[in-house]
Image (spheres, grey):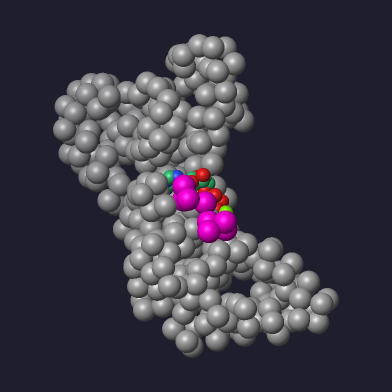
Amino acid sequence: DPQLNPEYTFDNFIEGDCNRLARSASEAVAKNPGKTAFNPLFLYGKSGLGKTHLGQAIGIEVKKEYPEKTVLYVSANKFTTQYTDSVARNSANDFMHFYQMIDVLIIDDIQELAGKEGTQNTFFHIFNHLHQSGKQLILTSDKPPVALKGMKERLLSRFKWGLPADLQSPDFETRVEILKNKIYKDGIIVSDEIVRYIASHITDNVRELEGALISLLAMSTLNKAEITFDIAKSVVDRLVSQPHREITVDQIQQKVCEFYGLDINVLQSKTRKREIVQARQVAMFFSKNLTNSSLSAIGAVIGRRDHATVLHACKAVKNLQETNTEFKHQLKEIESMIRQ
Ligand code: ADP
Ligand code: MG
């Protein structure tokens, strides 16, 4: 199918905390299109986090499982152009009928319909027809339904019927996995040290992660050299907008203490007081995520703890931020202090 990129499969979509719900809902939809509660499935998130990839993965999977079903992937812009052309050619009804025949309709970047009333109205009718006939709709957007502007209320309310599932920036481990998967597929040789370097410096966008690998490959081909750490470092440093500064465990301790109003000696002491334990765990968590230090090296610096304690700390912080939004905000603030 020319509309679907064969690379954008579920197999090639690395799972992490950042995308677990969106990914599993997408798989559920692909296995039973039109028959799950996720209709429409509304995938949203910032650019470069995998919305198009997941949308297409559904299309590819449905085609495989149900060859008889009609699957259409279309960008909202292309949909708009097709609609406008059909109006100009007096064939808006044909346009509508064509879309009403589809079993699984994937519309990418639905936010692009903002302000386009005619297109929205037509889409509204298509949506209703498909939904009532038990057909599956998958929509992607850069914002959740509640934040979409310039969209008719009756459309927005339908977007909220199914499941809005967000894609977030991948954490360090997921970034490493994404890079490794890509390296493996491309058959190139890149050391783990380099992978970790890229993953620790290019942090908020999968497209940029891939871009770094592509530049790296180009660079080594150009120089007819293998990909050394120095080459990787120069490529990555040029890609990240701010001049690179290595974050150290010491700096992390300082910033965490500054944030909590603690003395470093207290942080490193053996005290089991709750708020100090938490600050210590936060320092360990960021040390693991923002530096290349090993768990035992981190433990050695932060109060002579062993690697199991650091590992436990990282898990505790990760769990707490999932259930406690205030804590999650605090972490964001601390992270930005560390990165400054
Ligand atoms: P969006 O549509 O959200 O802007 P894309 O789906 O185009 O993002 O993703 C950008 C690139 O990153 C694509 O090449 C895609 O394959 C890749 N990508 C995104 N998320 C993942 C993931 N979880 N695993 C593997 N590759 C990913
Ligand atoms: Mg996209």
Residue 331 seen in the figure: no
Q: Position of residue 263 (x, y in %)?
A: 34, 29
The segment highlighted magenta reads 1-8
| Near-viewer residue (105 or 210) | 105
Query: In the rendered image, which quarter is residue 91 located in?
Result: bottom right
Residue 34 seen in the figure: yes
**Residue 53 higher or lower than 129, as above or below:** above
Q: Is residue 2 magenta?
A: yes
**Residue 219 higher or lower than 57, as above or below:** above
| Quadrant containing ligand 2 | bottom right
Residue at 52% across, 82% down: 130
Q: Is residue 333 magenta?
A: no
Residue at 60% across, 64% down: 74
Q: Residue furthest front?
A: 68
In this rendering, would 47 be left or right of 77?
left
Callout count: 0
Query: In the rendered image, which quarter is residue 145 located in?
Result: bottom right
| Near-viewer residue (176 or 226) | 226
Q: Residue furthest right?
A: 88
Secondary structure mostly taken by the magenta-highlighted segment of the chain: loop
Q: Position of residue 261 (x, y in %)?
A: 39, 37
Q: Position of residue 318 (x, y in %)?
A: 30, 47
Residue at 56% across, 71% down: 146
Residue at 41% across, 68% down: 67
| Near-viewer residue (7 or 328) | 7
In this rendering, would 141 be left or right of 266?
right
| Near-viewer residue (279 or 2) | 2
Q: Position of residue 54 (x, y in %)?
A: 46, 57
